[in-house]
Amino acid sequence: MKVEDVPQDLKFTEGTPVRHPIYAVDSEGKYQMVNSVGWEAKNEAIQWQLDAVQEECDEVLERIKKGESTLLEYYAVKNLMTVELLAHYADIPKRKVRKHMSDPEAFANLDEKTLSAYAEAIRMTVEELKTFPEK
């Protein structure tokens, strides 16, 4: 790819400092690094993943309504966090994280310290963590 052909598709990076380094051939035939703000193929892959995450979030919301899941699972999924990652960031054993994600009663009875650990790990407030999301 030539330097002047490096794609600059702003779909997901507009207004952000995100740049993707790409090697392209300059006018002298030498490779040089050129920053790109995105390109169609990558944007399609990102959109596909975002759609998949939204679909999973919708499924979790349905389980919450049925009393089979908790807001902790929803916000973890929404923020692309696995049980292992959330357990690590919150410094809570994985088995407890799994229980707090799947057992509404256990989640409802969490103390402020545990809620704060989860909220900090997910980068939100305790109030936000306990609030059902609006679509």
Image (cartoon, rainbow, N blue to C red):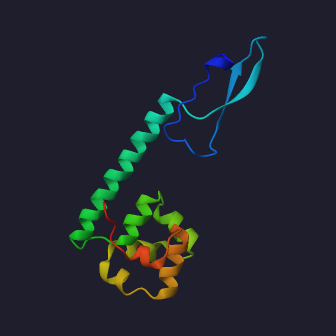
Q: Nearer the viewer, residue 23 or 86?
A: 23
Q: Nearer the viewer, residue 119 or 85?
A: 119
Residue lying farthest to the front in this orientation: 15
Is 75 placed above or below 5 here?
Answer: below
Res. 93 in view = no
Q: Nearer the viewer, residue 25 or 103?
A: 25
Is 53 placed above or below 127 here?
Answer: above
**Residue found at x 30% / y 70%:** 69
- Which picture quadrant has residue 97? bottom left
**Residue found at x 61% / y 18%:** 5
Quadrant, the C terminus: bottom left
Is 122 placed above or below 25 here?
Answer: below
Tell me if 86 is positioned left or right of 2 in this view.
Answer: left
Residue 57: image location, x then y, percent: 34, 58
What number of labels is visible?
0
Quadrant, the N terminus: top right
**Residue found at x 27% / y 69%:** 64
- Which picture quadrant has residue 58? bottom left
Residue 79: image location, x then y, percent: 47, 59
Tell me if 60 is positioned left or right of 36 in this view.
Answer: left
Residue 102: image location, x then y, percent: 33, 72
